[in-house]
Image: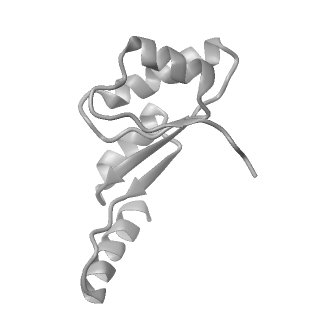
Amino acid sequence: MNHGLFMFPTHDAIDPASLARLAEEAGGWCPLPEPGFRERIVELRARASDAGREVSVSVLGLGPDREALAEHEQAGADRAVFAIRPGPRDDVQRQLDAILAAVG
């Protein structure tokens, strides 16, 4: 089993010092899709590379938007974690179908 430190920051928590600590110590980062986070992924990748490390990036809480997924991937995200609202089976199935359409 792979163990490591993953950072789940709160809003506005990734300042330059936190990003440096992420690159040097964390095994991964799980940002929310907030303004500016794509640029921080690129910066994190560069800092981790300078430190001779790799850091996994999992973007949390995404909706089924193919264009946004492509932008996150271009910025260096390794995976997307989709938000699925609980509800009746048919509602959940529609959400899953939309996610499959976005990633397919």
- The quarter of the picture where residue 101 lies is bottom left
Which residue is at the far right? 1
The image position of residue 31, as x and y in percent, is 39, 38
- The quarter of the picture where residue 72 lies is top left
- The quarter of the picture where residue 33 lies is top left
Figure coloring: one colour
Height in image: 62 above or below 96? above
Height in image: 99 above or below 39? below
Residue 30 left/right relative to 67 = right
Q: Residue at x 65, y 38 (%)?
A: 4
The image position of residue 28, as x and y in percent, is 56, 36
Q: Residue at x 76, y 52 (%)?
A: 1
Residue 28 left/right relative to 32 = right
Q: Residue at x 30, y 88 (%)?
A: 89
Q: Residue at x 56, y 21 (%)?
A: 23
Check the picture and name the quadrant holding the C terminus.
bottom left
